[in-house]
Image (cartoon, coloured by chain):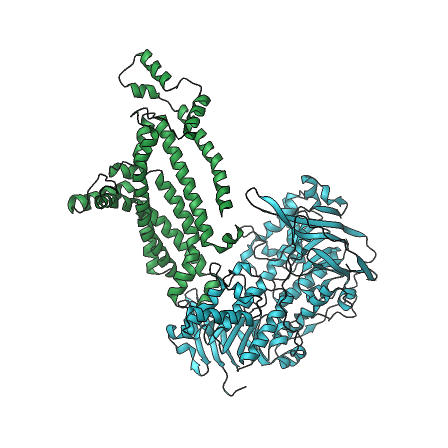
């Protein structure tokens, strides 16, 4: 296992380098000048030049990249041009918010999607299966922002059960934190639940027709044992991989949902940074997301190996 | 035998829902199985033999199937039981083992857990009691080091060992009836012998009733007291196995028996011999004409010298090579025009790899291959394509070797057109001609593979292989997946084509009886090496190498007189040709027994 993890981490290094070069050069191709954005009304060429000099924006792009990379290796992601805060600090503020949102969304997705998928597979071609498919399709086709706004109108404005927006850290006021996060994570979770449901259903269907399920039934096991213990654990393999990828996507931030519920997560941070040509922040957030994605993939692979004795032996 | 049979089936009719109606696939089948008795249901695919066994277990999907008639287990009507009561019967009073040991065990649970589950479920044992009993069962099915293998997973066992695990699981609850659905079909012949032996001896110990489902007349002859012959859903004949074999009344029974290749039936014959053809409706037998075809005067079209193919095994952080699979090791042989040379052996002996290496579908490690004037090992990409016009392949599985989205005509014409051997019009004529040659009509050209049966598809695959006018055909287990009667027909077709087109066949097979029938010469392979090679008659009538002898002794012969035969229980496993990096293959010596008959001596 350590060899396996070591191998995967080695592969991650060039991946991250390529992503960073890609993001770095793309940004420089964008029209717009960060110094102009920073200077606001100030148009004095001398001031602009001084700013450029200060942030070393006059250096050739490869030199800028090497400088940035050198900083990263020392744990310094640079400073936001807009707020003058270190990028690392900004990320440190927003990351917990995004992680909390992602985890809660995944919980919703799992609790709704997986049982529905199992049920649809077991009751294939019955009313239950069709209902589950329709619900899943609706979950996929209803836009997040619409569902978000409707929920706010219903639950917060009309019923007054939950706060419409805002954010509180889970370490400061856990109850309030959960209250503010329930609706946004439900909105994100339902869309993912639909995807999970479809995958769980097809994975279950293929497992249910396997020879070893016939063996399990021939042993006289109850449907419950056959489905939950013999089938579901096998069907879980592809679902786990998918979930890790979905979770990775959530880490990149959910721009629209964060906007509607005014949650200060990664989504809002990166949109603001792109509009302000705040290069260091964009670069930092993208790298952070990439690391998150790679980590999630690694975790998916490890889980896969743990769930699958055949792979476990090959390590 | 007691008066009341353990299992009594009366007028069993099973139907499936199809196109809004019910279509019966088993009709009015009746038979009994007494304690200690083995009854075989024999038939080809689509005969309803497996559906019969699943009907007894009530394992068919409930909404889409209907079971009528009367199935009594020790007098209790199984069809009248509730689903919950039926679960108490399954795996407890009636247990079942299946054909595919590789897929019939759950890959993510240890085999110990899967066996002890039966005991905790049906016998109310605690975990530790079940564990002890499971280990005892594993010992009874002769799995070495049973206690230490309890916590291993199915993939850590070979096919034969997995089938033993299945048997242990089935017998754990001491069932009164064991249903064995083609339990040895997927196994190698020496392993098949072991498993049959095991079932026989366990049956004696427990005085268990066994219902044995198979397509293999040799297995039937060896194991069954009584036999039911099924044909397209009907039980056409039932009786004592000896009666069926010697005085079978139904034309289909006779057709089936005549199509069965019988090891040892070729004594005194010089050339390959076609299978007799029996009309399944009238029962009239047409004896085949002896072949006049002689190959002695031809020069070799294919010469293989010291062929070696190894696959690296890599592991560790930097994927360093840590060993190799010595799939083919120092193999040499000639193949003459118009001749059939068979490569026989069990799984992993390197026979398929040899075939593929010769075509360079797999890159050989070293050696020399001369084919129709080509020095195969040195060819560049373009020449390699030209070379493949001379050698074509027919694969085992006719269901997956044809592209489902190409019509039969397109599939056959494609190689002809790709090699620019003529115009589209000529390709059409050629395709029509080939379809007629393989016994199909030219009119089927525009149909898709799924519209054909397995035997017909194999004919199509043969037509495709012939479209380039090859001189050599590598037939890799080409008849192994086919039903007995179809197998006989396809073998006859191959012999016809060989005679009319002067084809050379490299016939790769594990089936000794078929090989005996169709070959001029035979090479026996073991662990990547040829251990014995020679004219068919010499190898089969005077086998020299211990492995050849072992292989031939293990083949079930369709002769009920051999029913008492006991091979003695062994649990040898097939050895693996995986070697460490520093392995040096030993120098081999061969002894010439008679003209052209060589055997490895050291």
Q: Which chain is green?
A: A
Is A165 part of what is drawn in magenta? yes
Snapshot quadrant of residue B221: bottom right
Snapshot quadrant of residue A35: top left
Q: Is residue B487 visible?
A: yes
Q: Residue at x 38, y 66 (%)?
A: A223
Q: Residue at x 32, y 35 (%)?
A: A92
- Of residue B246 and residue B133, the one placed in the foreground of this image is B133
Q: Position of residue B56 (x, y in %)?
A: 47, 74
Determine whether, in the image, residue B493 is placed left or right of residue B132: right
First to last magenta residue range:
A162-169
Q: Quadrant of the N terminus of chain B?
A: bottom right
Q: Is residue B280 visible?
A: no
Is B247 part of what is drawn in magenta? no
Q: Which chain is cyan?
A: B
How many dots with numbers?
0
Q: Position of residue B385 (x, y in %)?
A: 67, 43
Q: Position of residue A21 (x, y in %)?
A: 45, 29
Q: Position of residue B242 (x, y in %)?
A: 64, 81
- Of residue B105 and residue B462, the one placed in the foreground of this image is B105
Determine whether, in the image, residue B543 is placed left or right of residue B39: right
Q: Is residue A76 above or below residue B120?
A: above
Residue at the farthest bottom position: B3
Q: Quadrant of the C terminus of chain B?
A: bottom right
Q: Residue at x 74, y 47 (%)?
A: B367
**Predominant SS of the magenta segment:** loop
Q: Is residue B52 above or below residue A133?
A: below
Q: Is residue B216 above or below residue B343?
A: below
Determine whether, in the image, residue B405 is placed left or right of residue B338: left
């Amino acid at each position: 296992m350590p060899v396996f993890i070591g191998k995967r981490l080695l592969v991650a290094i060039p991946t991250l380098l390529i992503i960073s070069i890609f993001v770095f050069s793309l940004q420089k191709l964008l029209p717009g000048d960060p110094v102009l954005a920073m200077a606001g009304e100030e148009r004095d060429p001398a001031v602009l030049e001084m700013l450029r000099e200060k942030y070393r924006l006059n250096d050739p792009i490869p030199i800028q990249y090497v400088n940035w990379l050198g900083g990263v290796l020392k744990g310094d992601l640079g400073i936001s041009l807009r707020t003058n805060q270190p990028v690392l600090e900004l990320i440190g503020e927003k990351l917990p918010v995004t992680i909390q949102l992602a985890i809660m969304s995944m919980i919703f997705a799992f609790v709704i999607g997986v049982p529905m998928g199992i049920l649809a597979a077991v009751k294939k071609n019955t009313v239950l299966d069709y209902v589950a498919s329709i619900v899943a399709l609706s979950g996929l086709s209803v836009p997040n922002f619409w569902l978000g706004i409707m929920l706010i109108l219903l639950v917060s404005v009309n019923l007054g059960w939950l706060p419409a927006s805002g954010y509180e850290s889970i370490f400061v006021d856990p109850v309030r934190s959960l209250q503010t996060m329930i609706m946004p994570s439900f909105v994100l979770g339902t869309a993912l639940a639909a995807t999970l449901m479809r995958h769980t259903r097809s994975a279950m269907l293929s497992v249910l027709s396997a020879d070893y399920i016939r063996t399990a039934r021939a042993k006289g096991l109850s449907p419950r044992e056959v489905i939950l213990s013999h089938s579901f654990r096998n069907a879980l393999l592809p679902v786990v991989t998918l979930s890790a990828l979905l979770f990775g996507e959530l880490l990149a931030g959910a721009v629209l949902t964060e906007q509607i519920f005014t949650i200060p997560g990664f989504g809002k941070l990166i949109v603001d940074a792109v509009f302000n040509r705040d290069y260091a922040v964009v670069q930092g957030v993208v790298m952070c997301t990439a690391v998150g994605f790679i980590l999630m993939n690694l975790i998916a692979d490890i889980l896969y190996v743990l769930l699958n004795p055949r792979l476990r032996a090959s390590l | 035998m007691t008066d009341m049979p353990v299992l009594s089936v009366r007028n069993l009719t099973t139907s499936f829902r199809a196109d809004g109606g019910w279509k019966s696939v088993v009709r009015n089948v009746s038979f009994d199985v007494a304690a200690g008795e083995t009854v075989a249901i024999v038939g080809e695919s689509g005969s309803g033999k497996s559906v019969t066994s699943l009907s007894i277990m009530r394992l068919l999907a409930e909404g889409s199937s209907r079971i009528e008639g009367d199935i009594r287990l020790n007098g209790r009507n199984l069809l009248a039981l509730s689903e919950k009561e039926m679960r108490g019967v399954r795996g407890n009073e009636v247990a079942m083992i299946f054909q595919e040991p590789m897929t019939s065990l759950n890959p993510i649970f240890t085999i110990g857990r899967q066996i002890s589950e039966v005991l905790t479920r049906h016998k109310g044992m605690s975990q530790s009691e079940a564990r002890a009993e499971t280990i005892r069962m594993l010992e009874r099915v002769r799995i070495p080091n049973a206690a230490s293998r309890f916590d291993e997973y199915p993939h850590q066992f070979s096919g034969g060992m997995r089938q033993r695990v299945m048997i242990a699981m089935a017998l754990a609850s001491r069932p009164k009836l064991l249903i064995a659905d083609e339990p040895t079909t997927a196994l190698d012949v020496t392993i098949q012998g072991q498993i049959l032996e095991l079932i026989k001896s366990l049956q004696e110990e427990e005085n268990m009733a066994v219902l044995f489902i198979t397509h293999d007349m040799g297995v039937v002859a060896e194991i069954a007291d009584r036999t039911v012959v099924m044909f397209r859903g009907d039980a056409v004949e039932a009786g004592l196995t000896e009666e069926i074999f010697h005085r079978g009344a139904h034309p289909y029974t006779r057709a089936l028996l005549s199509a069965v290749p019988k090891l040892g039936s070729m004594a005194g014959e010089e050339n390959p011999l076609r299978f007799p053809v029996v009309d399944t409706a009238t029962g009239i037998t047409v004896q085949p004409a002896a072949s006049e075809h002689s190959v002695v005067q031809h020069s070799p079209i294919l010469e293989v010298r010291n062929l070696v193919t190894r696959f690296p095994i890599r592991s560790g952080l930097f994927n360093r090579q840590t060993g190799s699979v010595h799939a083919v090791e120092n193999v040499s042989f000639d193949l003459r025009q118009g001749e059939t040379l068979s490569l026989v052996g069990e799984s992993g002996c390197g026979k398929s790899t040899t075939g593929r290496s010769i075509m360079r579908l797999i890159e050989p490690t070293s050696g020399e291959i001369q084919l129709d004037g080509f020095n195969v090992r040195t060819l560049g990409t373009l020449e390699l394509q030209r070379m493949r016009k001379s050698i074509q392949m027919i694969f085992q599985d006719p269901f997956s070797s044809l592209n489902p989205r190409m019509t039969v005509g397109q599939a056959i014409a494609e190689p002809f057109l790709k090699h620019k051997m003529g115009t589209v019009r000529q390709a059409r004529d050629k395709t029509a001609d080939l379809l007629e040659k393989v016994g199909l009509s030219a009119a089927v050209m525009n149909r898709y593979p799924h519209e054909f049966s397995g035997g017909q598809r194999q004919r199509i695959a043969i037509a495709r292989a012939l479209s380039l006018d090859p001189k050599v055909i590598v037939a890799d287990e080409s008849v192994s997946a086919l039903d007995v009667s179809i197998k006989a027909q396809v073998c006859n077709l191959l012999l016809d084509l060989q005679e009319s087109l002067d084809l050379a066949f490299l016939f790769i097979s594990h089936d000794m009886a078929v090989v005996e029938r169709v070959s001029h010469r035979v090479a026996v392979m073991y662990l990547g090496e040829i251990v014995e090679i020679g004219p068919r008659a010499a190898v089969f009538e005077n086998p020299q190498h211990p492995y050849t002898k072992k292989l031939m002794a293990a083949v079930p012969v369709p002769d009920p007189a051999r029913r008492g035969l006991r091979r003695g229980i062994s649990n040898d496993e097939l050895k693996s040709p995986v070697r460490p990096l520093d392995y040096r293959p030993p120098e081999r010596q061969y002894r010439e027994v008679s003209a052209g008959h060589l055997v490895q001596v050291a």
